[in-house]
Each structure stands twice: as structure tokens, then as C-alpha cells.
Image (cartoon, helix red, strand yellow):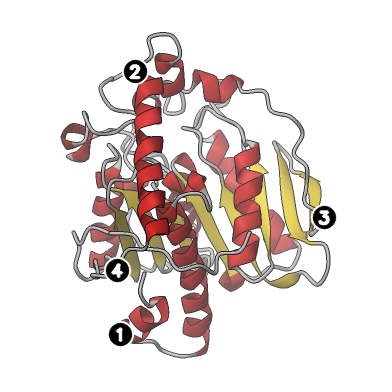
Amino acid sequence: MSLDAKTQDHPKDQLKETTTEQKPTEVSKEEKKSSMFAAFVRDMIARMTADRLIGPKLQNGEIRKNLVEPPWKCPSCFHLTQISLKQCNAELLSLAQNPNIDRVILQLHGGGYIGAMRNKYRSFAGLYNEIGGGINVFTPDYRVAPEDPYPAALEDALEAWQWLLQTGCQPSRIVVAGDSAGGGLALALCLYLKDHGMELPEGLILMSPWTDLTASGESYETNYTLDPLFGNTKESMIYNRDYVGEEDPTNPYISPLFGSYEGFPPMLIQVGSIEMLLSDSTSLAKKAKEAGVKVRLSVYEGMFHVFQMGELMLVESKKAWEEAGKFLRVLDRRRQEALSVQDEEDMYGEL
């Protein structure tokens, strides 16, 4: 599961001070083939969502919600511990030998607040473990709608956070990571912690975070026909109100884009350029930057929602995981010394 090989992506320079810049590099045959594979994956997603039988069920989350998976086979290099929280279960993934207990990642999974944790997030935990030098990864299987609408997911995320503190983890050594709804939940958790005078985590890794449940961003229109997963319909998960219920969707704990970001920890935000949720990330980055937050926004050209699920099979996905690993190393350096913008860019190198 090594991430050593160098790859190339083309992040869009929309926020010059916070985004990665495209750099001209030679593209190998392997990289060209991988990018062609990414285009093939985009086409396959679009074909599936266009299918009259499975398309609507894929877009509205019915397939995701009712998916039956075989038991996950934990690789021998890991140890998976089942944890019972008050309202949900959780899993702690650690190395079987010599685990790095200096830091932990609190992973909040995606699924539109209607899908439970799946095996893909156990694979994500393994990748986080690798890019973080063997660190533990704690993943709560938080409650979801419609059975458990807001604030159930936030309550469970908070309980997972408190469980980590009770086991001796320091907030300054916890990185909260999430994709899609999990990315929004990570932000909502931090907003709650800040509002209640509690210490915030060391950093945030946000993959295609769902930050605006009012669907008011410009990309909901500009990428409407481009997004292979959520495009060309208003019956998809991103318009689902099961989680919101009767609450105000502009509540920052539901749509964290409407929150205040002063005092927030550094963020890494990754998003695809053709997502309808693109503006959920770019608007978040702009607002956080204006509040004085250290933000690295990477817009991956031609990529779809949570393309990181391609893990090591897509050059863009592999590059995103490499970037996340470098973000963790930047946080390490920040803890030891003050870093300039150039120092940080030098640490990321040629992405």
C-alpha cells in the first residue's frame, strides 16, 4: 500500500494564496494511462447514474444505504478494536506492532448523513495510518437519518472526541478528517468545540466537504451538467433534507459554511473541479482564510466527488493521499517551529 511513487495532478489556481499551483512537468506513460483511467471512471459513474433503473437509487443514496458488504478482513499488519460508545459503535485501527501513539486521526465518514460506515472507510483508515507514520485512526459509526436526524451525528462525533480525550489523547495531537458529509461534520464538531470554550484539534483534513446544505453555491449551477454523480437531477443526496428535518439549514452545525472560523486550526481541503459541491470548498477556504486560518485548498482538475476513493488506482487520488501525508508532516514541523508560507510549500514539493 506504498505511496512512494511520484504522480501529477493539476489543481486549479482559484485562490492564489491558499491553493496549490499547477506546475509544468513531464507526464510519463504511466501517468497518462492513469489519467485515462480516471476519465474512464468518470464515464462509468455518469453511465450508471444515467441508467433509469439504478441511476436514481445511486444518486439519492438508496444503494449506498442498503449496501450489504462481506465482513472486512483486517490485514495482519493492523489491529482493529471495536469500541462501544453511548449511542453508536466505533473502531480503532492501529498497527499490530509498534503503533505510533503520538497522534491520532478522528475519521468521520461520508454518506450524506444517511449512509452508515462502509468497508471503504476501513481502507481509508489503513491509508491514514500509512501516511501518518503508523498513527491510530478512530472511526465512529455515527447515527444517520432519517431514523436519527440532526443533531445525532454531531452528538456522536462529540462523544467520539471526548472518548479520545478520556483515553489520554491531547487535542493538539488529534487531527480530524472527513469526506463529504464527514467533512462537514468535522467542521461542525470544531465549531461546537470553539463555541463551548473547548480546545480545538491540531488540524483538519477535508475531502470534498459538504458545507452548505442550502445548496446555494454557484457550482450547484455551473457544474450541474458536469458532475457525473450528482448532476442533472434535483433528486440526489445533496438535496436530501432527512438530516436537516425541521431545523434551519443555515444553522452552522448543519451547514458549517455559515459558521465563524476565527481561531480554527490549519485545514487541508481537497475537491474535484467538476463537483456540484466545488463551491462548498472554495467558499469555505475563502472564509477561513479571511478569518486568519492557515488553509491549503487543492482543486483537482476533472475530478469528481470524493475521488480519493480511487486510493492508489488513480494518479489523482494517489496524489491527494500523498498531499494529506505531507500536510501531517507540515503540522509536525509547525509544532516545533514557526514556518513561512515558502517553508510549507517547500515541504509539499512538486505535487
Q: Dot 2: within a 10 Å radius of its alpha carbon, few (fewer than 14), some, or many (20 or more) residues?
A: some
- Tell us which disc is closer to us: 2 or 4: 4
Q: Quadrant of the N terminus?
A: bottom right
> In this figure, which residue is indicated by the disc labeled 4?
26
Check disc 4 and give the amino acid type: Glu
- Tell me: 13 left or right of 92: left
Give above or below for 303 relative to 174.
above
What is the number of the mark on residue 342?
A: 1
Q: Say which residue appears at 61% left-offset and 44% top-offset.
A: 121
> In this figure, which residue is indicated by the disc labeled 3?
76
Q: Say which residue appears at 77% left-offset and 51% top-offset.
A: 75
Under circle 1, the secondary element is: helix
Q: Dot 4: within a 10 Å radius of its alpha carbon, few (fewer than 14), some, or many (20 or more) residues?
A: few
Q: Dot 1: within a 10 Å radius of its alpha carbon, few (fewer than 14), some, or many (20 or more) residues?
A: few
- Tell us which disc is closer to us: 2 or 1: 2
Question: Are the residues at dot 3 and dot 4 in contact (C-beta closer than 8 Å)?
Answer: no
Q: Say which residue appears at 42% left-offset and 45% top-offset.
A: 307
Question: Are the residues at dot 1 and dot 4 in contact (C-beta closer than 8 Å)?
Answer: no
Residue 347: x %, y % from top left: 41, 81
Q: How many marks?
A: 4
For marks 2 and 1 on the same chain, the one whose residue lies earlier in the sequence: 2
- Tell us which disc is closer to us: 3 or 4: 4
For marks 1 and 4 on the same chain, the one whose residue lies earlier in the sequence: 4
Q: Say which residue appears at 43% left-offset and 58% top-offset.
A: 320
Check disc 2 and give the amino acid type: Ala
Name the residue at the bottom extreme. 337
What is the number of the mark on residue 50?
A: 2
